[in-house]
Image: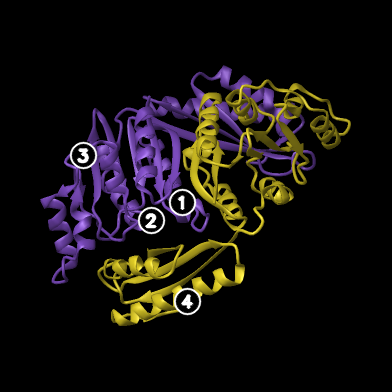
Chain colours: A purple, B yellow
Amino acid sequence: MKNASVITVGNEILKGRTVNTNAAFIGNFLTYHGYQVRRGFVVMDDLDEIGWAFRVALEVSDLVVSSGGLGPTFDDMTVEGFAKCIGQDLRIDEDALAMIKKKYGQADLTPQRLKMAKIPPSCRPIENPVGTAPGLICAVGGKKVIILPGVPKEMEALLKAMEKDIIIPDTHYYDDSVIIADVMESAFAPYVDRIMKEFDGIYVKSHPRNVEVKNPELEIEISGFGEDEAALRKKIEDAIARAGEYAVKLGGSVKR
Amino acid sequence: MKNASVITVGNEILKGRTVNTNAAFIGNFLTYHGYQVRRGFVVMDDLDEIGWAFRVALEVSDLVVSSGGLGPTFDDMTVEGFAKCIGQDLRIDEDALAMIKKKYGQADLTPQRLKMAKIPPSCRPIENPVGTAPGLICAVGGKKVIILPGVPKEMEALLKAMEKDIIIPDTHYYDDSVIIADVMESAFAPYVDRIMKEFDGIYVKSHPRNVEVKNPELEIEISGFGEDEAALRKKIEDAIARAGEYAVKLGGSVKR
């Protein structure tokens, strides 16, 4: 099973000014493309902090995807932080430069604009279909690093454009859930264990949706990875049905 | 300036099934209570991963706040992971036990329910005004760790209940922003630097709201911390006005 980590760069995320929807989008994309997402990092717009996140993420992951800090301003320093982490210098990449020039047309190539064409030699630029800063795909000793901008539309478009570099063939992910009423999470807890033992390789998690002790409602989420998509789907659906049976046995009911 | 880190525990966050609104709420609460939020961590429901996050967060932070993994199921292991990180054993806390008993009334004290009363000796329980699992405030060598449940309403209620343990007196935070139109982020970038030099101790960040090269729109966010609330506010507002002046100078306009 391949692991991935997701890095989000930006003080606005740490301060809670912006909710980290990018990490959710990327985490979901990676999961459905066959990765176990292992760790999420949110770091300040700071070279050392960015370098720290890439270094630690690479220690535990086959793929690291970052978003944020890729634009023209002084505090867009993700590429430099990553370069520092892998011990490379930035240099003008001709392909990246051509992409930037195309975007700005006749406008001056100011230092701030030129900055977006400076990348480490291990990276190749991918044209941004929405905004200006190219996304990067980088090779780091058999592992892969993907660097994306923070504007959600740009990040999403670039991630989709990189799909063939991300996908793990023959690894599928599937999940489904059932809502059960009138069973407390603490009462259902032993059955979470039991279902995980009855169906090999699945993951069961209960999400309380109401207050535990009065009018309890639980969402039972069951998920797993597998090579055979149809067999995986059947296993998850069988486990979902079993969860419903246990809920009824405990005096509860299945809401959907 | 005191630093804080925010830990979110839960596979559903990593997989992007749930957007991490908890980290945003906590980050915002801590910022407005005087902390520089330095790092965010998202980790799996796994003892070692949780222990890792607390250990690394404590290395760089005066205050660490976690949410998630505090309930009755097998994969609620935040307290155990934290205990392991600080080298303490869990033991039944009489106050926590009284809180749990009160919640469940006549219902059995199953192992899953009793689990929520087992905490490390360095922690004290705070009654959960909404759900069942108590929140924890822990002392770790002059630093503070706060452990909260993942259900947003419970997390928010507990965080507010702990306000007096969190707030840093005489440190205020203030931010404001201005929207400017028809100036590219790359054109405004040198003025971000300039404003930061003109007004001591403030932080300026530009957030592009449209596509850079056609019809550009920027939100200029200016923020800072200070001991004197009125002086801080005046400094930020003056810097906001200056940003508007530079936008006009560059041929743009101030939208609000």
Parent chain of label 2: A
Q: Residue at x 59, y 50 (%)?
A: B26
First reached walking from the N terminus: tag 2 or tag 1: 1
Residue A21 is labelled as 1
- Viewer-closest of B203 and A40: B203
C-alpha distance separating marks 4 and 1: 32 Å
- Viewer-closest of B114 and B160: B160
Q: Which residue is mark 4?
A: B238
C-alpha distance separating marks 3 and 1: 31 Å
Q: Which residue is mark 2?
A: A152
Q: Are marks 4 and 2 in contact (CB under 8 Å)?
A: no
Position in image of residue B12 (x %, y %): 52, 38
Position in image of residue B36 (x %, y %): 53, 51
First reached walking from the N terminus: tag 3 or tag 1: 1
Amino acid marked by disc 1: Thr
Decide: few, some or many residues near mark 1? Use Cα within 10 Å; few <14, some 14-19, many ≥20: some
Q: Residue at x 43, y 27 (%)?
A: A225
Q: Residue at x 83, y 28 (%)?
A: B94
Which mark lies nearer to you, 4 or 2? 4
Amino acid marked by disc 3: Gln
Classify residue B142 as left or right of residue B55: right
Which mark lies nearer to you, 4 or 3? 4
Parent chain of label 1: A
Parent chain of label 4: B
Q: Quadrant of the N terminus of chain A?
A: top left
Q: Secondary structure at mark 2?
A: helix
Amino acid marked by disc 2: Pro
Residue A88 is labelled as 3
